[in-house]
Image (tube, coloured by chain):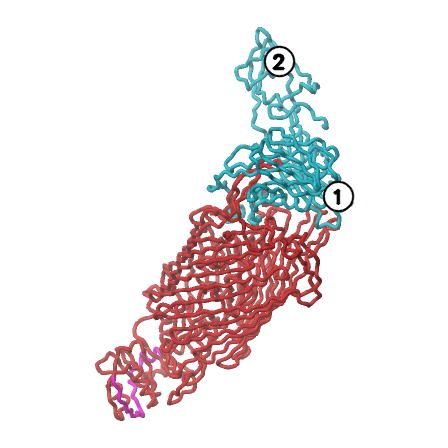
Amino acid sequence: MRYNRLCLWMMLFCLLMGSVTAMAQNEKRITLDVTDITLLRFVEQIEQVSPYRFYFDAAETDSLRITLKLDKASIDQAMQLALQNSVFQYAVDEQNHVYITKKYRIQTALAPDFFDKKKITKDPVAEPILVLPGTDADKDKLKASLEKKLFEIGPRTNNIGRGNAILTGYVKDIKNGEALSGATVFVDTPAIKTVTDQFGYFSITLPKGRHTLRINSLGMKDTRRQLIMYSDGKLTIELEDYIASLKAVTVSTDKRSNVRSTQMGVDRVNIRTIKQVPSVLGESDILRVVLTLPGVTSVGEASTGFNVRGGAADQNLILLNDATIYNPSHLFGFFSAFNTDVVKGVELYKSAIPEKYGGRLSSVLDVSTRDGNSKKLSGTGGLGILTSRLTLEGPINKEKTTFILGGRTTYSDWVLKQIPNSEYANSSASFYDINLNITHTINPKNSLYLTGYFSHDKFKLNSDTLYKYGNQNAILKWKHIFNNKFFGVLSAGIDRYDYAVSSDIYPLNAFKLSYDINQTHFRTEFNYNPNNKHSVNFGLHSVYYKIHPGSFQPTSAQSLVLPDKVPEEQALESALYIGDRYAITPEFSLNAGIRYSLFSNLGPHDVYNYLPGSPRTTGSIIDTTHVGAGKNVKTYSGPEIRVAMRYSLSANSSVKLSYNTLRQYIHTLSNTTAISPTDIWKLSDANIPPQRGYQVSLGYYHNFSQSIETSIEVYYKHMDHYLDYKSGAALVMNKHIETDVINTRGEAYGAEFMIKKTEGKLNGWLSYTYSNTRLKIDDPIAGETINKGNYYPANFDKPHNVNFIGNYRFSHRFSLSLNAVYSTGRPITLPIAIFTQAGSQRVYYSERNQYRIPDYVRADLSVNIEGNHKIKKLAHSSWSIGVYNMLARQNPYSVYFAQEGGVIKGYQLSIFGTVIPFITYNFKF
Amino acid sequence: MKKNHVIIVTCLLLVISGCRKPFEPPAIRADYNYLVIDGVINAGTNAVTTINLSRTKNLNDSSIAPKPELGAQVTIEREGGGSFSLNTQNNGSYTSQALNLSATAKYRLNIKTSNGNVYQSDYVPVKQTPPIDSLSWKQDSVYHDVTIFAHTHDPQNSTRYYRWDFVETWQYRAPIEASYGVANGLSYFINPFDALLQQYNCWTTTASTTIATASSEALSQDVISYAPVNIVKQHAEKMMVRYSINVRQYGITKEAYQYWQILQKSTQQTGTIFDPQPSQVIGNIHCITNTDEPVIGYVSVCTTTEKRLFIDYSQLNNWFFKPSGVVCVTVNSFQNPVDFRIINYPDTTFTIYYYTSGGGLVLTKKDCLDCRRRGGTNQKPSFW
């Protein structure tokens, strides 16, 4: 439905000013006999036997009970009888519309001389409009009118038939026409619910007849639509931004999605929340907000690698519009790779991972980007202490095609040069990234989506060695709607991550070490909604990997470096999946899915065969098998089960249970506890089996009032074939990595508590997580056991975590955000004794991870100041001012022991060891 | 603009440099007492093998000297029979007679400590070490530190893994060249050309404290070029006159190389955010009587080669010596009326500088006149 807003206001005005009372004509006679029914039932019965159509607020009138007997009564007689002794008034217009209002009677016609005074060339469309008394803001009136308007879906029929009809459509942002994904579209009775997909599309099957359709979306004002379903039809719903009103907030419907949804262990964060959280140096950072969610931890604050429920950092699948991002960090990990001006929202799946995702053991982080403003060309940008960003977006041709192009860069390189300290004279650091999205609607049934991402990092930190790395991704999606019940998305794309390390200070050793991973992927995804009880997903997902695990090349003519190359690896990973979301009863619903994955490591490859049963060392290689190009080196396959169920205990509480099994065929090799850009991704092969794991989790969800959500989730997770390293393992340019890694068995368990306030002037969340992650070496061919084969804590095991994020909005222009974090220190291996060897005192270390670094405590504060809200303005701007690490606590990132002049000294290193003030200027035009 | 500039720089400094402060581990007070074996079985001609045995100390033990293991019986055992015992020096050091070990045999070390525990290394093949081709040095452009490099090659391409240690000797001078010395309270005249009495030029010798290893694994030939052996930091007195380093090269096995690498990684690298995890070093020596008891050390059997390098102060650029803080103040006094040679000034840190006519005596700090007071010897080494 499209309105000419001006016209609408005119009409409202006119209706109020009108002085002629509408007289009902062509009265139809009504015969009825009803006892103690609601007004809703009453008017339904009248609608069935007469041409009258009623407009009123069902909620307002639900206390009214009607008992009467009519025999060929006129509409006036019927309504007078029905509404006698009540506060309600009625009016009937010439189109047989009946308006029931509280206290005030509506005027249904204009003053006779009205059109002579005002030149309105356009004939106002006779949309049924209710005028509400009071002095609310104009927008509220519009919203209220849309909410009270009755939408007729399908061609109107006198008798509403039996059976179901399907309503499809899009949920969009009213401001810029952006599709809203993850919005909940539901009716209360019967309880039917659906969620919009990544394109904002929904399909809901409803019994024919009258419904109140409710629409909730994170960060947007809730709304509802009054519908009469005659048959299948379409409806586009536009939502407004949620902005807390200065007056008492009255507009609100129930937020029950966390209670109602079958999904568990899913956290959604919208971009507004992300931007409110105080950040390092004022640059909003998705990953830092993700780190505040229950169950998510990090080994250190300068690292954007994260650990989900006791999983390693490489067990997270990080997707940007379905493109895999292998390194989500910039500038030693101080910034994440995602430009917040382009991002729409983030979803993190921690336990019930949908069957359409696979290939990683712990979690899926799904970052979705915006399509771009479809209404006008606009831009956003920001200037910070270290970085700047600019985003442009707009329609290309009349809302059919939109684009969004965003870029970020840093001037840290220039800043480093300004530091008057020779320590940094030899340092440099820089990065940039570019995002591009193009959305094209071919016709209502076909749409195309193109996403491109490019990032580049370069740094040299006080040494002669230069590091470079970058991500490159491109993905094209085609969405086709077959019919109201069935649609599909076909996508194909390429992902690449590469890094290079080079040094040329000594000509004889000048070298360049390079690494890259490439994947080409293809995906089909179908969604079939046969009726309101089932929603079926199925598809095929295929990835072809090509890895150049290491190339070591001389870079000068004199260089003695022998060109070396670790043989390429290639593999094909395919998976077929099917899943069904089945609403068995309104209380009980089930998501069940299965994913069957097949992984083949492909030749050409030389496979080392080791002496069976003895530790794998280069000495135990007995022979080598050459596998030709395209031939299978090794195939692994297996089913992955994804089950989640929800039982509603009441309208405000539910219990959920999920069980997942997962397989991972690609592993990160890194001997450091933080993700470093030089980590190696290795495919499973004949000697390295895939990681496998399962997770069981149970959750209880309760909503206390309309905006307070609480949840408790407990989980147990088991991992097999997780890779840990032998002492002093050499990973770079290693052609037989299996001799340096050890298969470990891991288990993790924990409980997560969360309380969240989603609306109001004060909003935010508080979460507490207890977790425990332990590893155990039980690989008979390891050759060495870590900690005598007993369980030991994983590097990222942090039992207690408390996170608080709060935002208080004093006014539309001024808000204050506080972020506080507490976590147990991570485990370390401590020195336990001193010995003297090779002329110097040295340390003897304890068993692995037997001690912990001090606990981590941090609080950040920021103030966001928006410019004035005048609509006609060249650019809207805002300032973000704050302090990171307000308590100036020197949280140890790492603890290390170094030998200095023959004596062992212990040090702790803090990355942000003091209060760091920041200021960022953001603008929008 | 100026102000912004300052803020940016401050923030970045805080961010990048981070913050480092001492860390005192709270947990570790237990008395671990593991055996530590340090030394190489020397397979050269008429070569003496020295093995040092000590015990680990607690972390809060601030003493520098190792805790020697006394009264152990140490033997070198040849695979297939034959053994040579080492004699105790009663300081934890055990030395052999001059031995000529077979280049083709394998040897191991047997230790029986006074508490009855028996320790044994694996059998190790004998490695022949090629000569050091040359030593070179270079000053880096930023700090002007001097790095000393070793260059070597093995025409047989069979050594591949190398370790170096070294002995440094440097010449330094007293601030003032003394004309008089004092013996038994009496002064005597020093002829500046008297090599035995002069106390202006001194020489100090120390052994290496760092681990230097390299491998030619990744190269087509067994050639080592620019392997850093030692770094002399800017401002060190070592380079103020003349510096010499005698580098000893060991050809080692791959396993020994890995052991030294782990040891080097765990204790010698400075803390950066990309550091690998420290790990327990596991050598090739085991406790036979208690298999759970960790033993520290790696026994290698090899020949050794050596080379010496000299660096003169005049060859350096931008080498600045930071004075030690000794101020050479002078004090005027009187000659002893009985015998002008008697020097008995109450402040014993002062000694005679020179006599003045009319019975005067000028004194100054002993540290200013006698270079030996800072640990060196005034006897020029034979190789100098």
Please report, as a chain letter, where disc 2 is located: B
Q: Secondary structure at mark 2?
A: strand
Where is mark 1, residue-wise?
B153
Outermost right residue: B155
Residue A846 x %, y %: 53, 44
Disc assigned to residue A79: none
Q: In the current view of this chain or complex, which residue is farthest to the left?
A: A85
Residue B187 tag number: 2
Residue B326 drawn at (x, y percent)? 57, 25
Q: Which residues are magenta?
A: A12-35
Position above or below: A319 against B378: below
At a point 69% along the width and 16% down the height, the residue shown is B191
Q: Out of A372 and B148, give the one closest to the viewer.
A: B148
Question: Can you tell which chain is drawn cyan?
Answer: B
Q: Which quadrant of the structure image shows residue A161? A: bottom left
Number of labelled discs? Answer: 2
